[in-house]
Amino acid sequence: MHIGQVFRYSRPYDAANELIDGLPNYFYYTQSPNSKLPLLESGINPIQKIQSTSRSRRPAILISSSPHKIGMPETPWQDVFDPDNGHVRFYGDNKQPGSDPSESPGNRVLLEQFSLHSSPNKSDRLAACPILVFRRVKVGSRAKGNVQFQGFGIVNRAERVTQFNRREDKPFTNYVFDFAIFDLKEEDGGFDWGWITKRRDPSVSEVEAFKASPKTWQTWASKGHSTVESCRMRVVKLLTTPTNAQLPPKGSREEKALNVIYDYYSDRKVRFEALAAFIATKVLENSGSSYRNGWITSAGSDGGADFIARLDVGSGLASAKLIVLGQAKCEKLTTPTNGNHIARTVARLRRGWIGVYVTTSYFSESVQREVLEDKYPIVLINGKRIASEVCTEMDKSGESSVVEFLNTINETYDQQVSVRQPEEILYD
């Protein structure tokens, strides 16, 4: 099995045929002798524990996410898949207001593994099981019955979050898990299910099963948390992003949202700055550094900036404060943003500043190459990312109308406008 490979997952379950409907058969590639077939019928699918010669162990936990159900009452969240950078963000299985999220079946087994994965004791890590992630995808006109392998790894972080149950019109508490997806370069990019088969066999010792594991798993289990980043999957790719990857898919929820966003601001583009500042906050606050939102500049004295913020790297004496100069452009969705606008933004940056350019449109290859080749310290946020962040925030808040969500953002515009020098944010 390779990361990105799509498998056919269909009924009736059949492990005999290698191919079904022209795709590799999921059950053929994941079968183990004398064991039940590993199903993906829930979001969190733990394979039953076995009692080995030394102690009990869980062979693996299989994660299945259905992006086509994002925003529906039964899935009021948006999982994030970035296997090329070794990261998957997955929401747990609690949905009931008033219930303890740690007691839902799926959350409970993931929290159990998080305790083992984050343990400083080698014996705990050796007892831990791998997390295998699959994403349901569309193949041609067939939306169901296709799963794409996203990789394997560990639970790197578990966090309680508040979400909204639309059916009961109430908030509820859930867990969101960050999975570190491990590299498979020593295995030439292939994941050998034989390791899971050994982990499912009671006659196979813990040591013997461990020897069959990928090299990154062996490194992590032996040395611990300090090796997570060196074990994490990193794919070296062409650094420019094609146009079709910067715009939402046709007919998708995000495409509809982006069209509404453009229409909403088309005759009041200056107020798009409030949404742009909000999106920049959501993008950069998840970067691992501390992001502080500042203010929107007054139209008559903006000095070429639409909003100001600050990015703090490190802490205490071992820290640096970077001024963020933001540009917001509500532009036609079918036309790439003007490279001159980006050049003017970069020209206004000083030492210790970074730029953020937020557009409803997309960035041409030539503009991206210029930014890369000249090593401009600027973050480019395209229309697809705007729509994705808006949909994610709507799911969190329980808002079903894009217009109503934008109304809420728009109401903050006048309060955020300020006539200040960018350097002042260093002292806030």
Image (cartoon, rainbow, N blue to C red):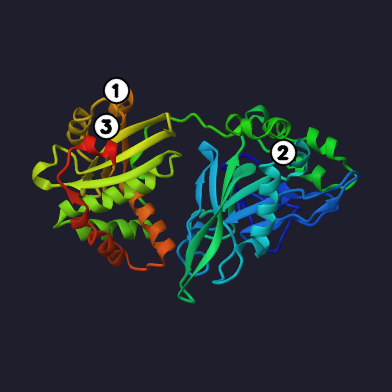
Under mark 2, the amino acid is Asp
Earlier residue among tags 3 and 1: 3
Earlier residue among tags 3 and 2: 2
Instruction: Using the rendered view, name the quadrant where residue 382 is placed.
Output: top left
Q: Quadrant of the N terminus?
A: top right
Q: Name above or below for residue 360 compared with residue 217.
A: below
Residue 247 shows up from this direction: no
- Picture disc at residue 192: 2
Asked whether, in this view, residue 418 is left or right of residue 257, the answer is left
Residue to which mark 1 is pinned: 374
Earlier residue among tags 1 and 2: 2
Q: Quadrant of the C terminus?
A: top left
Under mark 1, the amino acid is Asp
> How would you rate the neighbour count of disc 1 (Cα within 10 Å): few for under 14, some for 14-19, many for 20 or more?
few
| Disc nearest the viewer among 3 and 1 | 1
- In percent of width and height, residue 413 lies at 21, 56
- In percent of width and height, residue 252 lies at 39, 58
> How would you rate the neighbour count of disc 2 (Cα within 10 Å): few for under 14, some for 14-19, many for 20 or more?
some
Callout 3 touching callout 1 (CB < 8 Å) = no
Residue to which mark 3 is pinned: 367
**Tag 3 secondary structure:** helix
Alpha-carbon span between mark 3 and mark 1 = 11 Å
**Closest to the observer: 413 or 56?**
413
